[in-house]
Amino acid sequence: MSKEEAKRLAVLKQLSKKDMSQKRAAELLGLSIPRIKSLLKDYRDNGIKAAVHGNVGRTPHNAITPKIKERVVDLYRSRYHDFNLTHFCEKLGEEHNLDISRASVYRILGEYKIASPRKHKRKKHHHRRDPRRRAGELVQLDASQHDWFETGVDYHAHGAIDDATGRVLGLYFAEQELTNAYFEVLWQMNADTGLPLEFYTDKRGCFKVNSKELTIEEQLSGLTEPQTQFNRALDELGIDLIYANSPQATGRVERLWGTFQDRAIKEMRLEGITNPKDANEWSPYYLGKYNKQFQRQALDSEIAYLPRMSEKELELILCYQDKRILDAGLSFSYKTKIFVIPSHIKAQPKQAITVLESPRFGIKAKFKVGGKTVVLKPKQLQKRPKIEVVNETPKYKEHINVRRQEYGRMGKAASPWKYFDF
């Protein structure tokens, strides 16, 4: 019998002996007077049973059966052994139609002495920066090196998260942290919400040139510090880039990687994904599902994203660009290959052109003719055929090789080459 039931029994005994008024009994038990009268009648008819709740000893209609408990434990041990409990509860509902609360799952696994695999470390306190008020004002951009496919090989996941809403705007996997991979994230962002007003990143080589030397072209263009290809693309897009001085400054994207390393890896394991190509095809589906669950409302309903750009316009910006000068034959060299401008295009010798390169389209050339910008596609650029050089060994060298094989390695004094007349 609980303390409340013992107190109720003592009050009912005094009521039956008329040692206490019904009003006082109602105050002590927190019940109404009609309820006190009903309990008193029950006590006189059934005795002590009136103080005990009628459901004591009964199995609740919504109780989890032992069979379901065993199934939950078997699923966790066989398939979801390293899932955190919240993630495991979601999978029970999505894949197995078991709608069980996290507290119930925690209690069931606790009965079998199974603890959550995720350890919660004591958090260090840092000054928390308030998120931006509008979606699209600021986006944090970063990459994470990890064994994403559980193959023993580390790959890099490139991602972007909106500072105001926590919406993940892009996710792209690659072998290394590359500028082209970040360009792919920007492609995803443009297709989803549009590009933001500012990016917040660390000082890695993709975003910042740590050397202080400027090229002559950069000095003439008015730059005060060297530019990376990513910097140049953002300048053309009109987007500002802010550098963080510590990992804590970009804490939202850092915490995102912790969540993805816990959740996305296991989701890819269930889907049988073991390489970056399949992961990049799967990532839009996963981001849609993730954002639906974890995205929050911005403080301000106004949206600050830039208008979406057309693919033709964007591909001329999100690529590698390099300067070249046309020679007298209206050709230029790029990566050990010679490209010739078609004769029907009125280009001029010693004219500056821009070479564009991207995995999406290959190599293009951009320059101005008569005040208009001309962009030549890879099919329009003619490659100069390679000249095969035939190595003909002179006859006297063939004779030397024969004599060397005949005499072998000899000292200088006894060598016949000392007296040999060519």
Image (cartoon, helix red, strand yellow):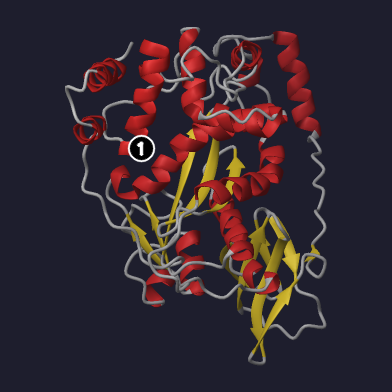
Who is closer to the viewer here, 384 or 113? Answer: 113
Relative height, residue 134 to residue 360 (above, below): below
Who is closer to the viewer here, 21 or 320? Answer: 21
Give neighbour class at mark 1: few <14, some 14-19, many 20+ (Cα, 10 Å).
Answer: few
Picture quarter containing residue 73?
A: top right
Residue at the spot of label 1 = 34
- Screen quadrant of the N terminus: top left
Residue 101 relative to residue 276: left or right:
left
User: The residue tagged with tag 1: helix, strand or loop?
Assistant: helix
Residue 160 relative to residue 319: left or right:
left
Residue at x-position 38% and y-position 24%: 41
Relative height, residue 28 to residue 227 (above, below): above
Q: Position of residue 206 (x, y in %)?
A: 46, 51
Residue furthest to the bottom in view is: 370
Residue at x-position 34% and y-position 52%: 210
Relative height, residue 154 to residue 419 (above, below): below
Judge whether residue 181 can be spotted in this image. yes
Residue furthest to the left in view is: 19
- Screen quadrant of the C terminus: top right
Who is closer to the viewer here, 2 or 98? Answer: 2
Residue at x-position 81% and y-position 38%: 392
Q: Position of residue 396 (x, y in %)?
A: 77, 31
Picture quarter containing residue 52?
A: top left
Judge whether residue 329 can be spotted in this image. no
Tell me which amino acid carries mark 1. Pro
